[in-house]
Amino acid sequence: PHLPVDGSRMRMSLGLRPLDPARWLERGPAHEQTMAHKRSVLSSGHDKVVATLPEGLAASVETLDLVVDWLRRYGPDERVEPEQAVHPVDAAARLVADDLCVLFRDASQWRLGAASVCSPSRWRLSEKIGRTVAEIHRPVPEYAGWYSDAVDARLDRLSTDRPLWRLNWTIVDDPALFQPHPPANPRAPDQVLLSDLTVRVERQTLRRLPATGGIVFTIRTDRARLSDLATAASCAGDFARTLRSCPADLARYKGWSPMLPRVITLLEEAAGLGSQA
């Protein structure tokens, strides 16, 4: 539902946009599939996808109240009854397709205080809980520079009546939603096909919690095979142009470096552009 590229140059950017509160938790086309995935992962590996700290409890309670109120007001069914026997961030995340991360601010920095993340994109929640936002994003190229300061300042300025949203995306060689780590045996670059690759698009939102002052960060992950997207020559060309502009450090961070030249060539062929190398 959210095509992540338009052929423009690839660069690090916050890319935050104003969000209509009525569209905070929009339902994607794979809503039921994602909900079934959540139920399965929570049943088989709850401790891997839910993590909480006492410092995040109050904001988690407020997050649950906010989710329930939003669903009763804007959802397809106003009869919303959260589970009572689980942590409030867990209960809230079981009601929506989005993963939920609750941030609290200590004396100086924002930290991850509670989360339910059933669709991680090659990171582990156990390594992020309790960390500051800067520590969580330390592997991201250039984050320690201006990017970290810009994020912290934006979180501090976030108002309760003006939520924000952005898109984050990557290309991976595994269609699974639950991907806490890279594959042990990636495909050889010269054997990669567009049909082997999946475009993961995360629709992310940030919303300030009025009572506690915390922030709830939502992540809804949608997927499409790159070969399906590339059937439209314009889309294949947009992906090729954007990927060709990807900085080397960002390509390494995303795990694209070995396969990127071949993927660009395949996309250019699909777009009828021929190789531009």
Image (tube, helix red, strand yellow):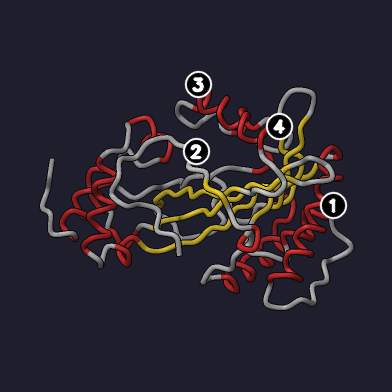
Residue receiving disc 2:
14
Q: Tag 1's secondary structure?
A: helix
Q: Quadrant of residue 86?
A: bottom right
User: Residue 25, percent across and down?
Assistant: 63, 62
Residue 44, numbered label: none
Q: Earlier in the sequence, mark 3 or mark 2?
A: 2
User: Residue 229, percent across and down?
Assistant: 32, 64
Q: Quadrant of residue 269?
A: bottom left
Q: Amino acid at mark 2?
A: Leu
Q: Amino acid at mark 1?
A: Val
User: Residue 44, percent across and down?
Assistant: 70, 61
Q: Earlier in the sequence, mark 4 or mark 2?
A: 2
Residue receiving disc 4:
110
Judged by depth in the image, the label closer to the viewer, 4 or 2, is: 2
- Mark 2 → mark 1, Cα distance in angstroms: 28 Å
Judged by depth in the image, the label closer to the viewer, 3 or 2, is: 2
**Count of numbered circles in the view:** 4
